[in-house]
Amino acid sequence: MSIAIDRVRVSVDQGVADVRLVRADKMNAMDDAMFDALIETGEALKRDQTIRAVVLSGDGKAFCAGLDTENFGKMASGAPRRNSDLAAQRRTPGGANRPQQAVLVWREQPAPVIAAVHGAAFGAGFQLALGADIRIVAPDARMAILEIKWGLVPDMGAYTLLPGLIRDDLARELTYTGRIFSGEEAVSFGLAARVSADPYASALTLAREIAGKSPDATRAAKRLFEGARTWSRQDILRQETLEQVALIGSPNQKEAIMANLEKRPPQFSDPA
């Protein structure tokens, strides 16, 4: 399976979707076409029951350098009231406008998503990386919540994604200053799982490992992680039980047991 959309290229192999931003001449900066491509790609993958893990990366020298600078020129030349159109944009049932959904669609994937970050991940690009479940970064990657440089606030889901990853005071410092930090710093802050000299290769290796596990269990685990961000303690405990009851004795759970007992690779079925 392969998908080719302007700005994004996707290939799927053995349950791993390799999603690559392909606007290398602009360091994968986001414009309207990139927003559309990310959403269209993400929505298509959400419907594909064969997907067991996703790798999100950028072509060329950077993961994503942020918002296309042409957009800043338009902001500076237009009357401020024209920007009321942004607030009036149609929103998803979850409350996201189009730029926000370009990020949040990756958190909404049923399967785990791994961002492989190299080069620059500024502003919108940094928020796109936050949309993944896991981030693997190059040690010398350059990352920043850069919106303050342009007189703006991060508005692509950062305030829903940062809490739980990073201390509140540090999140505020990075947001108020826009300072650039390295991949190694990102790991120390809690913003990335680990550094790698080749984050793309490491992300693919991890994705293949995840794809080899029961897709029913990994999807259930992701649902629990996402729900636990807002559920009460009582609801979390109840949902843990409900997910476990649904898994116990299911075909893929039986296959996990038999594969372990027989010391062979498991052969899991795609979710119904």
Image: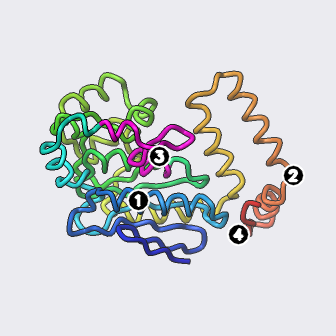
In this view of the protein, which residue sits in the foreground, 26 or 141?
26
Residue that carries the numbered disc 4 in the rendered image: 265
* Numbered tag placed on residue 249 in the rendering: 2
Residue drawn at 28 percent across, 48 percent down: 183
The region drawn magenta spans 84-106
Q: CA distance from mark 1 to mark 4?
A: 39 Å
Assess whether mark 3 and mark 2 are in contact (beta carbons under 8 angstroms): no
Q: Going 72% across and 54% down the picture, which residue do you hit?
A: 216
Instruction: Tally the marks.
Output: 4
**What residue lies at 47% left-to-right and 41% top-to-bottom?**
96
Query: Is 180 or 101 nearer to us in this picture?
Result: 101
State the residue at coordinates (71%, 22%): 234
73 is higher (above) or lower (below) than 208: above
| Residue 14, picture quadrant | bottom right
> Sequence-wise, which precedes: disc 2 or disc 3?
3
The reply to whether the magenta stretch includes residue 105 is yes
